Image: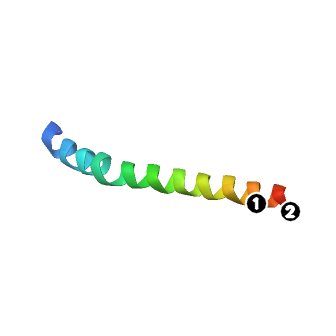
Amino acid sequence: MFDAEVLMAPLIIFMVIVAPLWLILHYRSKKQVSQGLSEHEHR
């Protein structure tokens, strides 16, 4: 019933745009948390 190309286009767009943004935001927030903890330890 479903045409594979109809599902592949949104999937490729998701993987190219959403996945990298999610990874960047995830590691950015992780970096901020680690910096915040290190500043708190120094005090």
- Say if mark 1 contacts mark 2, CB within 8 Å: yes
Element under label 1? helix
Residue lying at the far right of the rendered structure? 43
| Residue at image location 76% in from the left, 60% down from the top | 39
Which sits in the foreground, 16 or 32? 32
| Residue at image location 36% in from the left, 54% down from the top | 18
Quadrant showing the N terminus: top left
Which sits in the foreground, 25 or 13? 25
Q: CA distance from mark 1 to mark 2?
A: 7 Å
For residue 8, above or below residue 22: above
In the figure, residue 7 lies in which quadrant? top left
Give the residue pinned by disc 2: 43
The x and y percentages for residue 14 are: 30, 50
Which sits in the foreground, 41 or 21? 41
Task: Specify the amino acid type for callout 2.
Answer: Arg
| Residue at image location 83% in from the left, 55% down from the top | 41
The x and y percentages for residue 17 are: 30, 54
Q: Residues within 10 Å of mark 1 (few under 14, many from 20)?
A: few
Q: Residues within 10 Å of mark 2 (few under 14, many from 20)?
A: few
Q: In the figure, is residue 16 to the left or right of 42?
A: left
Residue 31 in view of the camera: yes
Q: In the figure, is residue 2 to the left or right of 23?
A: left
Residue 3 in view of the camera: no
Task: Specify the amino acid type for callout 1.
Answer: Glu
Give the residue pinned by disc 1: 39
Element under label 2? loop
| Residue at image location 18% in from the left, 47% down from the top | 9
